[in-house]
Image (cartoon, helix red, strand yellow):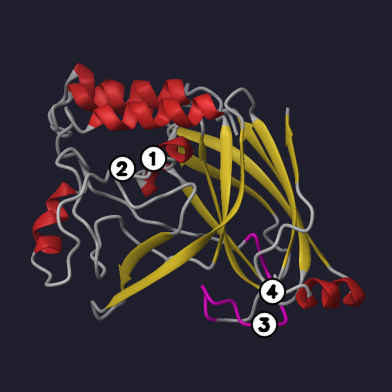
Amino acid sequence: MNRWLVRSAAALLGVAGLFLSVGQSSAHVVFGNSLFSDASIVDPITGVAGVGSTFSNQNRTVRSNAGWVAGLDATTGGDSHNARFMYFNLAGAATIDFTINATANSNGASLLNPGYSLFSGAVPNVSHDGGYYPGKTTFASWSPFAAENADILAQPDNGGIGERWGDFRANADVTMRADDSGGNPIVSTMTYTGLFGANSNANSISGQYTLGPGLYTLVVGGVNSTDLAVLLSHAIATNGDYTTPSGALTGYNNARLARNFNIQFNVAPVPLPAAVWLFGSGVAGIIAFARRRKSV
């Protein structure tokens, strides 16, 4: 990972809190079809039997070209609405192999510079950054979710004052909340595996890992720190007014234009002897037995 990219993102996000005001709060984490859900077991997201590799070739979109890089900052985190959450479910040890390719955008936006992070487990489907969970700190006053701060502070076990932009982290565990049809909270955490890929100069990236059985989340977003600077500058200029037409709002919306990408995702079961060794090593579950990253 380019250290300059990490430092630049942290610096940009660090100054954002001085200027940004409350923005809009909309949309949620929506997984859509699984990348792979083993047909021999129940899919934990849908609650029905898996469908295998039916959806191994998918066209998706992501907001902005900076959603992944924004999540590198430990203080602010990133807005989950600017990243794409996808999942897969393995019944046994398997090698996954995927390629993410940016595709043309009819809206005039630049091609996506894709990055990804791999997590074990998943946050609830339709999770929302503003949802409260025990110990959650409040958002910065400039966050799009600052309106939820009163609800968070009203809880007896809130984490107090915070400086967060959103709940997404590209390089750490992520906890989020959704509510069921009865309004009851569902809170879960997806655990960062330490596996990621990012290249701000490329429009394609690949990964190959051998993993143990379980549910995994692959989060894709833009890694362009220049685009992050543009997104933040326009957000700052709106002064928190995301409804009144203005040049700043137009610039902000343009910076968040959808970027298209295609993902091809393949799964190959690990032969039994190798799988036995894998689990006997004491690192079953989250393990990168082999890793490959390719940028084009």
Amino acid type at circle 3 is: Ile
Residue 275 percent coordinates (x, y): 83, 74
Residue ID for mark 3: 41
Q: Crowding at label 4, few (<14), some or many (≥20) Cα neighbours within 10 Å?
A: some
The kind of secondary structure element at disc 3 is: loop
State the residue position of label 2: 76
Mark 1 lies on a secondary structure that is loop
At x 8%, y 58%, the residue is 150
Was residue 63 drawn as part of the magenta stretch in this picture? Answer: no
Q: Main secondary structure of the magenta part?
A: loop
**Which quadrant would residue 102 be assigned to in this image?**
top right
Q: Which mark is residue 240?
A: none
Q: What is the number of the mark on residue 213?
A: 4
Describe residue 165's horizontal placement relative to residue 98 as left or right: left
When asked about the image quadrant of residue 234, the answer is top left
Mark 1 = which residue?
73
Give the residue drawn at x 59%, y 38%.
261
Front-lying residue, 196 or 43 = 196
Instruction: Report whether residue 124 is seen.
Output: no
Looking at the image, which residue is at 12% across and 29% down?
A: 244
Q: CA distance from mark 4 to mark 2?
A: 32 Å
Q: Is residue 45 magenta?
A: yes
| Nearer to us: label 1 or label 3 | 1
- Residue visible at 72% across and 46% down in the picture: 207
Say few, some or many: other residues with alpha carbon within 10 Å of mark 1 (under 14 / 14 to 19 / 20 or more): many
Q: Which stretch did the figure color magenta?
A: 35-47
Q: How would you rate the neighbour count of disc 2 (Cα within 10 Å): few for under 14, some for 14-19, many for 20 or more?
A: many
Label 3 with label 4: CB-CB less than 8 Å: no
How far apart are the alpha carbons under marks 1 and 4?
30 Å
Give the percent coordinates (x, y) of residue 54.
Answer: 71, 63
Question: Which one is earlier in the sequence, the residue at label 1 or at label 3?
Answer: 3
Say whether disc 4 or disc 2 marks the residue closer to the N-terminus.
2
